[in-house]
Image (tube, rainbow, N blue to C red):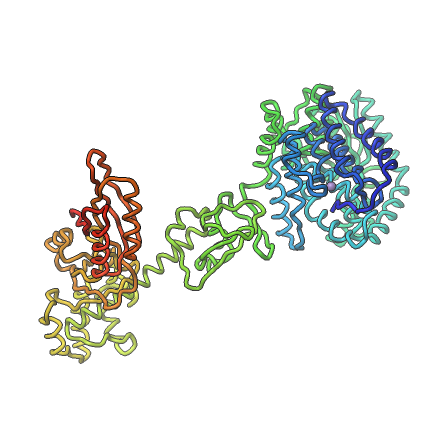
């Protein structure tokens, strides 16, 4: 919106129109200092030049639009920076003026405002879902780091709506709907009621021109019918207040056409039911006068029970304050009244903008009037402490909406997440299946790390893979409780499944050691399993196997019981197998050994004290609750455990085909010199060993130093090749697998 047409204006015509337009604006700037007015004029000249030759749809020079926007801002008594930004608001987008240029000419606060407005312009809202509109509104508010950006944007939208008749009809629907869905509710939320009503009526008029026409004629007719009656009420009111010496300002109050339409439409009411209600507003000097005025009115006309509302004691969230009552007026018609002070009126009509309006008026008559509500009071407190609009806005924002960040899915759905949320939080917010399978992500089309924090307006795209699983490291940066609990849940289930598989393996091996070759089937041996479960006190087979895998139960004890039960059921152990398993070579542990290939993940741990690799003789220790821990046969830690806790050891062996590399500690002594580390790293790379970790023992006194590496190797043979390669390097004096003292 606001794109200029490309026709060239006659330069002479244009300059005449411009001069008068800007003069109209300067007439409203009497609240600014002379130097501020000069700055505004400078911004006007710059904008005028930038937009030269561009025309509005009406045929007017384009500059008339920024002037109109600035005039609206001047009515709100916004500061000079805001007025300058209003004049320049389309310069970046439409004229190719850069932010750097704006900073050079007008300073960075003004440039930031213009930049903020340009960014808002780039967002377009095109979904009809109600909750999406709400999110979009919040996103707009959150993105505008300065409330002045929102106010200028509202002034911009108001002028575009006022001049919509000049635009092609085809554009009316979309723009009017957007105004109704997004901008008028924002105006309402910020308490700018006058703008709110105007935007609604203008949208209604362009969205449903025919209904608007019919309704406005009907309202006009109804008003003229009641004109005498309303005049009578007003006269009686004036006389009453005059008799009590109370200076008041009385105004008739008219409903907006759109609110009449909505009421009829939503509540299925007739035109007469909606419009046969008349309203007056009584403006009084002091807060206590509101209550006095109420008393006087109740003496004049009979109140309608249940219609009195005290919005002074309890203000509405947007800062609105007034007393409301409904009375039965002449000829029995209901008349609504609102009592408020001038400053309450200011807030009621202008909301957030009252911050600036109040600043201007504060030196005048209502300086001592208390604005009462916490919200406004806090605004005023802030104003006392700082004149910084950004800080003011931060404080207002806290009251307006929670600490949230709003982002788009690739399908332009809007998602609200807590501030600080990351890509992973976003993935889990979409669906736990998406979160669990997240592999990579793009923000605004660029690949980003999964821990990246989201910013308002980001378009976030999650790349999933069926084989991907949650990483425990995610827990360190996710922000939402949902993501955290889903990740924990998944990791736990993953570990339990693995433990169950290991338990199955362990029990099968223990059974072989007892002479049972085939693992008893859950269905065929249902009775036996039931008895076993009763013996162990486990809930089910799965739990028993998991417990064995986690080391909470010892497999050969369970196996012995199972063998007894199988014997009861008539299945005898195979004596040959039993002999082979128990007394066969290399098997002194009372049960068969299980083969490890490195794919066991969480249920099997390779001890960090000795870091076993394929080819090493190994022992398995079934730790309590931690699953199987594998040590090398020479490990001193394992030796101590074996002495203390021997029955928890079991035979393990390497599978013939390990599925991954294993980490091993290396101690490398090198001559001290430049580039030594690089040479060692190069030697390791040449031997195809990945470096996992490096530790240096700093000893500058010596001419040599020792480096500690953790590298990943396939097996013993690979390790030997790595060590040989290192030995051949000229900088290495010694390289060996290090044995940490247990
Ligand atoms: Mn504009």
Is residue 468 depicted above or below 85 in this figure?
Answer: below
Residue pictured at 77% horizontal, 48% vertical: 203
How far from the left and from the top, in percent, is residue 525?
Answer: 25, 76
> Hey, which quadrant is residue 220 in on the image?
top right
Towards the viewer: 566 or 657: 657
Q: Nearer the viewer, residue 473 or 493?
A: 473
Q: Is residue 662 left or right of residue 147?
A: left
Residue 718 shows up from this direction: yes
Residue 64 lies, with reference to residue 524, above or below; the image says above
Q: Is residue 517 above or below residue 259?
A: below
Residue lying farthest to the left in this orientation: 583
Q: Quadrant of ligand 1?
A: top right
Q: Examine the image and state in which quarter residue 306 appears.
A: top right
Residue positioned 51% across, 53% down in the render: 442
- Image coordinates for residue 736, horizontal then vertical, percent: 18, 51
In which image quadrant can residue 592 be found?
Answer: bottom left
Asked if residue 319 shows in the view, the reply is no
Q: Residue furthest bottom?
A: 570
Q: Residue 329: x, y in percent?
A: 82, 37
């Amino acid at each position: 919106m606001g794109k200029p047409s490309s026709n060239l204006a006659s330069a002479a015509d244009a300059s005449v129109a411009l001069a008068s337009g800007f003069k109209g604006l300067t007439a409203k700037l009497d609240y600014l200092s002379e130097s501020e007015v000069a700055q505004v004029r400078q911004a006007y000249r710059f904008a005028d030049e930038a937009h030269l030759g561009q025309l509005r749809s009406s045929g007017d020079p384009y500059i008339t639009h920024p002037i109109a926007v600035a005039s609206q801002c001047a009515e709100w008594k916004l500061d000079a920076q805001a007025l300058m930004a209003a004049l320049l608001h389309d310069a970046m987008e439409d004229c190719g003026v850069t932010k750097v240029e704006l900073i050079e000419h007008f300073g960075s606060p003004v440039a930031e405002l213009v930049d903020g407005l340009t960014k808002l312009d780039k967002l377009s809202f095109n979904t009809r879902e109600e909750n999406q509109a709400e999110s979009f509104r919040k996103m707009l508010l959150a993105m505008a780091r300065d409330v002045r950006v929102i106010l200028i944007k509202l002034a911009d939208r108001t002028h575009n709506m006022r001049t919509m008749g000049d635009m092609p009809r085809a554009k009316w629907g979309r723009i009017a709907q957007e105004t109704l869905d997004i901008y008028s509710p924002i105006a309402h939320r910020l308490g700018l009621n006058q703008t709110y009503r105007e935007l609604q009526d203008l949208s209604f008029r362009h969205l449903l021109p025919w209904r608007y026409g019919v309704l406005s004629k009907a309202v006009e007719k109804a008003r003229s019918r009641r004109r005498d009656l309303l005049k009578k009420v007003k006269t009686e009111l004036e006389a009453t207040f005059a008799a009590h010496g109370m200076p008041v300002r009385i105004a008739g109050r008219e409903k907006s056409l759109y609110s009449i339409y909505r009421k009829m439409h939503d509540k299925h009411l007739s035109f007469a039911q909606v419009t046969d209600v008349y309203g007056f507003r009584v403006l009084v000097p002091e807060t206590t006068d509101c209550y006095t005025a109420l008393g006087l009115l109740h003496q004049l006309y009979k109140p309608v029970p249940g219609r009195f509302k005290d919005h002074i004691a309890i203000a509405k969230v947007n800062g609105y304050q007034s007393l409301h009552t409904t009375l039965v007026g002449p000829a029995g018609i209901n008349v609504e009244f609102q009592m408020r002070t001038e400053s309450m009126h200011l807030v009621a009509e202008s909301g957030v903008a009252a911050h600036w309006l109040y600043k201007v008026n504060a030196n005048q008559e209502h300086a001592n009037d208390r604005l009462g509500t916490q919200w406004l009071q806090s605004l005023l407190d802030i104003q006392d402490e700082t004149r910084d609009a950004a800080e003011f806005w931060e404080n207002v924002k806290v009251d307006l909406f929670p600490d949230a960040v709003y982002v788009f899915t690739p399908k332009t759905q809007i998602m609200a997440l807590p501030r600080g949320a990351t890509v992973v939080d976003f993935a889990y917010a979409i669906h736990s299946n998406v979160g669990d399978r997240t592999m990579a992500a793009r923000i605004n089309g660029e690949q980003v790390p999964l821990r990246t924090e989201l910013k308002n307006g980001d378009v976030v795209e999650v790349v999933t893979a069926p084989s991907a699983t949650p990483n425990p490291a995610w827990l360190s940066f996710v922000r939402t409780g949902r993501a955290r609990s889903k990740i924990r849940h998944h990791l736990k289930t993953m570990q339990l499944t693995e433990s169950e598989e290991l338990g199955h393996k362990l029990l099968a091996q223990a059974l072989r050691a007892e002479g049972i070759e085939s693992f008893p089937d859950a269905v065929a041996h249902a009775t036996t399993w039931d008895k076993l479960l009763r013996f162990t006190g486990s809930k089910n087979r799965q739990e028993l196997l998991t417990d064995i895998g986690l080391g909470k139960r010892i497999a050969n004890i369970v196996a012995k019981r199972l063998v007894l039960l199988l014997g009861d059921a008539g299945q005898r152990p195979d004596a040959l197998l039993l002999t082979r398993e128990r007394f066969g070579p290399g098997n002194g542990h009372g049960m068969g050994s299980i083969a490890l290939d490195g794919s066991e993940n969480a249920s099997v741990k390779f001890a960090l004290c000795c870091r076993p690799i394929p080819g090493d003789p190994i022992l398995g220790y079934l730790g309590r609750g931690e699953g199987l821990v594998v040590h090398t046969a020479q490990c001193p830690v394992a030796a101590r455990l074996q002495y203390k806790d021997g029955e928890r050891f079991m035979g393990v062996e390497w599978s013939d085909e390990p599925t991954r590399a294993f980490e091993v500690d290396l101690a490398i002594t090198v001559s001290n010199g430049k580039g030594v580390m690089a040479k060692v790293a190069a030697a390791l790379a040449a031997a195809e060993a990945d470096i996992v970790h490096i530790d240096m023992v700093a000893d500058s006194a010596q001419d040599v130093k020792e480096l500690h590496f953790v590298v990943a190797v396939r097996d013993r043979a690979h390790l030997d090749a790595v060590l040989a390669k290192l030995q051949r390097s000229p900088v290495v004096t010694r390289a060996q697998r290090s044995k940490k003292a247990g």
